[in-house]
Image: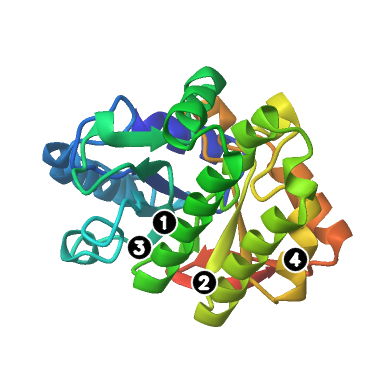
């Protein structure tokens, strides 16, 4: 229940907390919200905003999938929702124009499924899949409708298991750099995602790529991407420390409805 997340945030002395449920898709999945649930979601967060107004700033958002030019954060459905901010992410790579779950390659699932997709749909060439992933991310940024790019390089989570040292290869870093150059041009934030930090010592973007953000003056915000209340603060202190150690002097936070620089 959303209120459990709020209670945990209050117990840890949070100043603010934002909800960003996985957005509806053209097909149903286990983790994405159904479009029919949207009114209830918005109403519940509005109720919590009022109930905890003297304890916590609460914001409502969505993590919105980019699939293709017909379904992405920029379409009118998402633009017209009364959201405080929008996170854009790539979880699926469509195999054709027909947007159904059985026609998607999921980059965020288990490794066995990922490996099968590389072998079956990309001829065993991880480079082709990674290229399509970053091309989709860049198209998402171009179409707009987002404030934040979510887990920008999550493709490495399974990709590095498919091919060791993937992230150290020049072609991979060049794809990421091109993506970051566009994000810097569009002045969009990048999420420092700590979901896997405690469990697997992983962040998205990977720690080795943090300097690329700093070089481009890309603003960052830290997000636990938690699906359970007790993980609301998971990895945040560690992420703030390595950002500071990397040379960042501030992160972006919503304060009274405005994105501001919060000194580290």
Residue 88 numbered mark, or none: 1
Within the image, what quadrant is residue 163 found in? Answer: top right
Residue under numbered circle 2: 188
Label 1: state its secondary structure. Answer: strand
Compared with residue 37, is residue 18 higher up or lower down, i.e. above or below? below
Residue under numbered circle 3: 84
Q: Earlier in the sequence, mark 2 or mark 4?
A: 2
Label 2: state its secondary structure. Answer: loop
Q: Residue at x 41, y 56 (%)?
A: 88
Residue 32 image position (x, y, % from top left)? 30, 35
Residue lying at the far right of the rendered structure? 245
Residue 121 image position (x, y, % from top left)? 42, 34
Q: Would you call the spot at circle 1 few (<14 residues within 10 Å), some (14-19), or many (20 or more)?
A: many
Where's the N terminus, which quadrant? top left
Residue under numbered circle 4: 212
Q: Nearer the viewer, mark 2 or mark 3?
A: 2
Q: Earlier in the sequence, mark 2 or mark 3?
A: 3
- Distance CA(mark 2)–CA(mark 3): 15 Å
Q: Would you call the spot at circle 3 few (<14 residues within 10 Å), some (14-19), or many (20 or more)?
A: some
Residue lying at the far front of the rendered structure? 123
Q: Residue at x 26, y 50 (%)?
A: 46
Q: Would you call the spot at circle 4 few (<14 residues within 10 Å), some (14-19), or many (20 or more)?
A: some
- Distance CA(mark 2)–CA(mark 1): 11 Å
Residue lying at the far bottom of the rendered structure? 185
């Amino acid at each position: 229940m959303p209120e459990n997340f709020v209670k945990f945030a209050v117990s840890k002395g949070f100043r603010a907390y934002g909800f960003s449920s996985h957005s509806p898709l053209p097909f149903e999945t286990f983790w994405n919200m159904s479009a029919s649930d949207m009114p209830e979601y918005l109403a519940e967060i509005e109720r919590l905003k009022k109930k905890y107004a003297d304890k916590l700033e609460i914001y409502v958002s969505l993590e919105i999938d980019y699939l293709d030019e017909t379904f992405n954060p920029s379409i009118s459905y998402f633009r017209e929702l009364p959201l405080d901010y929008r996170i854009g992410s790539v979880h699926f790579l469509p195999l054709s124009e027909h947007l159904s779950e059985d026609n998607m390659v999921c980059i965020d699932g288990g490794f066995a499924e990922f490996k099968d997709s590389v072998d079956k749909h990309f001829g065993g060439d991880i480079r082709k899949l990674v290229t399509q992933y970053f091309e989709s991310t860049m198209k998402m940024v171009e179409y707009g409708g987002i404030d934040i790019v979510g887990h920008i390089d999550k493709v490495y989570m399974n990709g590095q298991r498919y091919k060791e040292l993937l992230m150290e290869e020049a072609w991979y870093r060049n794809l990421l750099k091109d993506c970051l150059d566009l994000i810097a041009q569009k002045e969009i934030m990048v999420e420092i995602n700590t979901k896997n930090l405690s469990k697997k010592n992983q962040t998205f973007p990977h720690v080795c790529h943090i300097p690329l953000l700093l070089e481009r003056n890309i603003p960052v915000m830290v997000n636990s991407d938690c699906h359970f209340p007790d993980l609301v603060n998971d990895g945040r202190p560690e992420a703030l420390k390595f950002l500071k150690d990397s040379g960042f002097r501030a992160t972006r936070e919503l304060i009274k409805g405005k994105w501001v620089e919060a000194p580290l």
